[in-house]
Image (cartoon, rainbow, N blue to C red):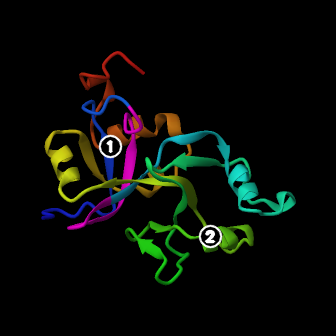
Amino acid sequence: MVNENYKGKLLISSPEISDGIFDKSIILICKHDANGTMGFIVNKPVIDVTLGTIWATLGYDEKNLHSPNEDVLIGGPLASNAMFVIHSPEYFIDKKTIKVGEEISVTGTKEITDHIQKGQGPKKALFLMGYSGWMPGQLEDEIMRDSWFISEKLENLIFSVDYKSKWTDALFLIGIDPSKLSSYAGSS
């Protein structure tokens, strides 16, 4: 049973999560209902993979690639070969785009990449491989164990490309000084 709907909110990992992919991660929740939760990590680039690498894999002309040096993010450990795009809301594909909130949408089809290559895509976009998911009740249990801080989504934070400071910035925005957190005190 879902008591609170976390769709459109950010999860910011706490010191309770101190290793693995979710350590110091920020996750945008895109779906949260009785069937479970789906979200995307928005602050961890894939090492040695740029958008140009993905464009080439998808067969786009290398001479006309859109933003080939842009980072691709690890969206999560599930479906790691699937590409998703978190983007501004003016772009919409009927029955394929999930509206996460007033300022954010998500599309996970090749159609969006075709539109981006033609200059017809969204104004703002984050490119991700994979997603994060929770079974029904699992996220609520993790929140009860203080594994996550919850914040209203902040468009500027989501689309920021300063990935190294994004987690710290998110904590400061919700009034938490990361240096005061017990597991992270004294580390950077």
Identify the residue position indicated by label 1 in the image: 12
Q: Amino acid at mark 2?
A: Lys
Relative vertical location of residue 166 with respect to residue 10 in this rendering, above or below = above
Magenta segment: 20-37
Measured as percent of width and height from the top left, residue 113 is found at: 65, 67
Q: In which quadrant of the rendered image does the C terminus lie? A: top left
Which residue is nearer to you in this view: 172 or 37? 37
> At numbered mark 2, what does the secondary structure look like: helix, strand or loop?
helix
Q: Quadrant of residue 120?
A: bottom right
Task: Looking at the image, tell me whether mark 2 or mark 1 is earlier in sequence order.
Answer: 1
> At numbered mark 1, what does the secondary structure look like: helix, strand or loop?
strand
Is 27 colored magenta in this rendering?
yes
The tally of labels here is 2
Q: Quadrant of residue 39?
A: bottom left
Identify the residue position indicated by label 2 in the image: 110
Is 34 colored magenta in this rendering?
yes
Q: Nearer the viewer, mark 2 or mark 1?
A: 2
Q: Amino acid at mark 1?
A: Ile
